[in-house]
Image: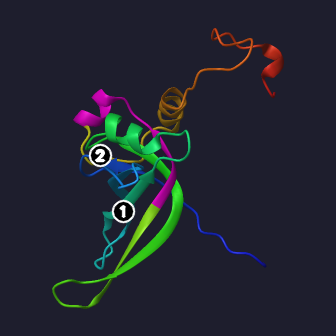
Amino acid sequence: MAGSLNRVMLIGRLTRDPELRFTPSGTAVCNLALATNRYGQDASGERREFTDYHDIVVWNQGNRKLAELCGQYLQKGRMVYIEGRLQTRSWDDKDTGAKRYKTEVNANDVQFLDSRQDGEGARGGDLAGSAAATATATAAATATPALGANAGGDVDPDDIPF
């Protein structure tokens, strides 16, 4: 293989409310903290749930106001799908002078997977919910106004690929 790949896809719940900030040039950036669950065996052989925590950075991208939308509509407990790339930053610690590193996901897509009511009541719940419910929530959360003749909501049977 000649190339390389840096791609991350996560589904999880936010562990805190988003932090929306603006750079000195006016570009919006939103920081999210995400928890994902996985299952495995602990040292004694018992089945156990493990939680991993991820730092996410979302930027506005051109006309896509993704960071601002995240800051406006997301809150702690909401389930989201994040797609992006891993990025590691480094800096010198002001107190000790030691070199510090932080690896985070630089998101280029965020999809809201539940409604506000679902996210408020579900704090760190099971991520293995039904696939049909997730697909329905994803479709509803990512719906955008249609362009062209079918902007009224009707689906042309000729547009269905099967």
Asked which quadrant contains residue 5, the reply is: bottom right
Foreground: disc 1 or disc 2: 1
Residue visible at 77% across and 13% down?
A: 156
CA distance separating discs 1 and 2: 17 Å
Task: Say which quarter of the image contains residue 101.
Answer: bottom left
| Residue type for callout 1 | His
Vertically, is 42 above or below 160? below
Dot placed on the residue nearer the N-terminal end, 1 or 2: 1
Q: Is 73 drawn above or below residue 105 in the view shown? A: above
> What mark, if any, has residue 54 been given in the picture?
1
* Residue that lies at the very extreme toward the left in this rendered image: 95
Residue 156 counted in the magenta span: no
| Residue depicted at x 26% and y 91% | 98
Q: Nearer the viewer, residue 6 or 101?
A: 101
16 and 113: which is toward the camera: 16
Give the residue furthest to the right: 158
Residue 123 x, y percent position in the rendering: 24, 44
Picture residue at 78% right of the left edge, 79% below the top:
2
- Colouring convention used in this rendered image of the protein: rainbow
Check the image and name the residue furthest to the front: 25
Quadrant containing the C terminus in the rendered view: top right
Q: Which mark is residue 80?
A: none
Percent x, y of residue 72: 33, 35
Q: Give the number of the disc on residue 125.
A: 2
Q: Secondary structure at mark 1?
A: strand
Classify the position of the N terminus by image quarter. bottom right
| Vertical arrangement, residue 6 with respect to residue 93, above or below | above
- Would you say the residues marked 1 and 2 are in contact, meaning their CB atoms lie under 8 Å apart? no
Q: Amino acid at mark 2?
A: Gly
Label 1 crowd (10 A; few <14 / some 14-19 / many >=20): some
The answer to if 115 sits in the magenta stretch is yes
Q: Which residues are magenta?
A: 106-121
